[in-house]
Amino acid sequence: MNLPVRKVTADVNRSQPRRVDVNTEPPFLTLEKLIPQLLKRQSTRGQEHERYLRFRGQSGRCSEYVSDHNSSRDFLVSVFPDVNIKPSGESSLAASGFIAVGLFVLPLRNSVAQSCRIVPALKTLKMSTRPELLAPPEIFYDDSEARKYTSSSRIVEIQARLSERALELLALPEDDVPRFLLDIGCGSGLSGETISENGHQWIGLDISASMLNVAVEREVEGDLLLGDMGQGLGLRAGVIDGAISISAVQWLCNADKSSHEPRLRLKAFFGSLYRCLSRGARAVFQVYPESIAQRELILRQALQAGFGGGLVVDYPHSTKKRKEFLVLTCGSVPTSINDGHKGSGSEDDDDDSEDEDNGMVCVSDRNRPRKKQRTNKKGKGREWVLRKKEQSRRKGNDVPADSKYTARKRKSRF
Amino acid sequence: MRLIMHNMLTCNIKGVINKSPLRIEAEKVIKKEVDFNPDFLRHMLAKIEWKALVDGARSMGYTELPVHAPGIESDEPFLRKFHHALLELNLEEGSLVCQESGRKFPVNKGVPNMLLHEKEV
């Protein structure tokens, strides 16, 4: 599969793309070829312009991905809008309908227009619906996306609900004394507003300047900070009474730059978080983990940093309503953690039961039945088939004769 | 950016020992009124680094904070001053400077940019 890759030129001085020669070798571009050419940092006038190579999770080679996961949706799509990507007939990749090429985003700080053009193209070409696979957070959440995110009433409602639940799980003492909280990945301040409504003071941290601009416009009451949580929080020890994070921590699991190593970033994040939390304080993260592996990665790093705690799942049996909250405790172990809201068949009942927290962490993945569930063939054996045939014969139908092949177990394909 | 956050911020650069506090270079300061809550102020009193607060308030133009924090008795006038310095002074434009390395973190529209470069992590 020879991919007609358009040569993109990127020159930071003229805000034009610089010419990049990429060796394409059928059937796919490999990261080893792309990396030497693409991952160069240029410093011009004291500003750093970096080319980002985006790849999934821990260091995985694109070519390995292609060969091992034929029908996986882990494939990344080329950023060049002009490229004609046609599925080739020969490769087994085509059978699954997915095409794999290397993905690179060129975010030049001066030419925001460049990235603005690329990301919408990405979104139309996207194979995956997860935003963290499209672009790094500071680029995905550009001005237009930030505005869309904040003006969508559905998102506002969901964020408010999630923030309320997270605040509940923080189990702050009910003495009407406002506390000092940290909102990690505060974005445009939707979750922060919920904190303010509950009377607490807060600091919000986010990596996207566009989202923070929206927060400033909305005049949120908390203090905002432009920073990267993977670089460490940069707060003094023991000052924070509680931390919440709504849909932000999963961004840490993707490496957005060549220098990123997700495990180290998670380690820096959880280590600095543990330090800045006061004794007995909690951190509640609402996450959408992509897979069990990702969830375990997050949990493992959290435990290594010294946290205790567990996972609270609301509505575990509903696909739409299911929400996961990672509750981490710092210092003393709490006496109870509210059980997740359970749906009772019709998913509308709230059934809170107090559970003893024994300090252990358990991860449970819901058993999701396959959509096309095979019927169990136990009920219809040879005897039943023979009986039915006899019945049919009595009716007068034309029934094939019984032989040793009657009701024989066929291949599962049938 | 209010002094309540400034008091908690440290310089996260690798190798820097004297991380806190960051010196404020104020260019534009505005005052926003916030509801007075003595319980919260008493709760925060234990966490605040007093000298950093006094220096920060001074560089933002507020000099009425006592040099030493009162021990146990914190009366109303003191709490009022504390409240004003902690929650009502907003730094809109300026920069935060790390004492040890000299690195400047710019503050735009009240949001400090604490993003570190690759080499500093």
Image (cartoon, helix red, strand yellow):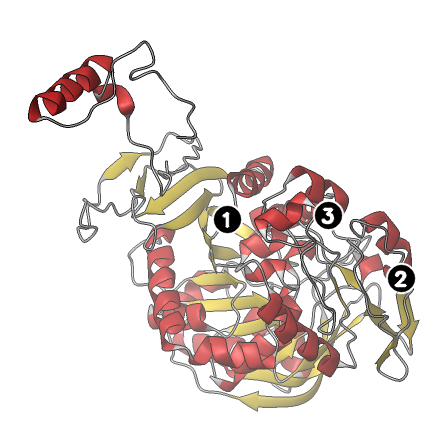
User: Which of the two labelled residues, at mark 3 and mark 2, occupies the earlier sequence position?
Assistant: 2
Percent coordinates x, y for residue A158 in the rendering: 36, 66
Q: Is residue A64 left or right of residue A148?
A: right
Q: Are marks 2 and 1 in contact (CB under 8 Å)?
A: no
The amino acid at mark 1 is Pro
Please report the residue visible at 19 percent of the width from the left and 15 percent of the height from the top.
Answer: A386
Please report the residue visible at 63 percent of the width from the left and 63 percent of the height from the top.
Answer: A134
SS assignment at label 2: loop
Output the chain of dot 2.
A
Q: Quadrant of residue A411?
A: top left
* Distance of label 3 from label 2 (alpha carbons): 17 Å
In which quadrant of the rendered image does the N terminus of chain B lie?
A: bottom right
Position of residue A389 relative to residue A185, above or below, is above
Please report the residue visible at 41 percent of the width from the left and 26 percent of the height from the top.
Answer: A412
**Labels 3 and 2 positioned on one and the same chain:** yes
Disc 1 target residue: A289
SS assignment at label 3: loop
Output the chain of dot 1.
A
Residue B65 visible, this orientation = no
Instruction: Categorize mark 2 by other alpha carbons within 10 Å: few (<14), some (14-19), many (20+).
Output: few
Disc 2 target residue: A40
Near-viewer residue (B23 or A395): A395
* Distance of label 1 from label 3 (alpha carbons): 18 Å
The amino acid at mark 3 is Glu
Percent coordinates x, y for residue A98 in the rendering: 62, 53
User: Which of the two labelled residues, at mark 1 and mark 3, occupies the earlier sequence position?
Assistant: 3
**Residue A261's mark?**
3
Q: Is residue A362 left or right of residue A299?
A: left
Could you tell me how many numbered marks the image carries?
A: 3
